[in-house]
Image: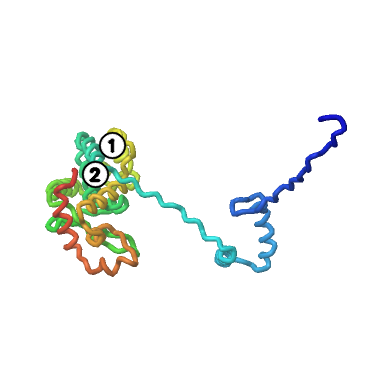
Amino acid sequence: MTDGAEKTTEPTTEITPTPKIATATNTSTRTPVREKARQFAKQLIKENPDCTYLRELFRHIRFELKISPEETPKNLPYVPTEEEIKKYYAVVWQSRNMQNVIITKTLLYTGVRVAELVRILISDIDFDRCQIRINQRKGSKDRIVPFPESFKEVLAMHTQSITQEGGIHLFESSWKKPYTDRGIRKILAVYSKAAGMKHSISPHKFRHFLFTWLKKQGIEDALIQPFSGHESRLSLEIYSKLSIGDAQESYENVIAKFPV
């Protein structure tokens, strides 16, 4: 700067901080949940509320605040591959424990739930029609499940052996008592470990595998439903028009290609 030159200064601009705007994700302004609960409780205690009242109250609060309940994503069940089923069954067969072989095949061929399996009586089996009646507990509907004709002789020999020893259930322990759900699961878990399965095989995985496999063979849901035990209000009308005979014919046509 030269002597005598007028000194100038640049104007300064004052910056005002922008206020924070609360958004749906900004929780810093929220009252802690426990404290808010106490505040609500003080207001509601004279109303003598019960669970139904509170449930309806918060439903209306969500409506007033335009808050939709969050839906928990449903994970698809794991379904073993054909290769995994073959690998698993090979280990079961190599054990030469014929009762365990028949337990495995019964689960695979029928898709019954483990709680249903342990309740099957020998008298529930119709060898002429290759069917098993699944007797449900009070309040539930009984149903018929098919099994392959190729499995009939092995199953008949097994039931004859049980009958000769005074048994009445399809599967009984060495103490002449029916297996428990837990007992069946333990048996399957042993073979899962021996086969080196990445996912432990459970009775319900066999069930998922059968119905998925039948779908892949082109069998419609309406034909699978009569022996699956699945019901819904939307499908009942359609399914009621189908008989187990229709379902079994389709089942028998494809089951020869089953992997075990």
Residue 185 percent coordinates (x, y): 32, 43
Disc 1: CA contacts within 10 A as few (<14), some (14-19) or many (>=20): many
- Image quadrant in which you'd find residue 53: bottom right
SS class, disc 2: helix
Tell me what residue is drawn at x 30 percent, y 44 percent: 184
Name, please, the residue furthest toward the top. 2
Say whether residue 131 is left or right of residue 199: left
Nearer to me, 91 or 161 = 91
Residue 50 percent coordinates (x, y): 59, 65
Say whether residue 58 is left or right of residue 99: right
Disc 2: CA contacts within 10 A as few (<14), some (14-19) or many (>=20): many
Image height of 8 relative to 207, above or below: above
Residue 220 percent coordinates (x, y): 23, 59
- Image quadrant in which you'd find residue 142: bottom left
Nearer to me, 35 or 204 = 35
Tell me, yes or no, if residue 132 can be seen here. Answer: no
Query: Hey, what amino acid is under mark 1?
Result: Tyr
Tell me, yes or no, if residue 2 can be seen here. Answer: yes
Q: Is label 2 in contact with label 1 (beta carbons under 8 Å)?
A: yes
Nearer to me, 217 or 227 = 217
SS class, disc 1: helix
Tell me what residue is drawn at x 81 percent, y 39 percent: 9
Query: Hey, what amino acid is under mark 2?
Result: Thr
Query: What residue is disc 1 on?
Result: 191
Tell me what residue is drawn at x 18 percent, y 57 percent: 131
Image height of 201 relative to 53, above or below: above
Query: What residue is disc 2 on?
Result: 104
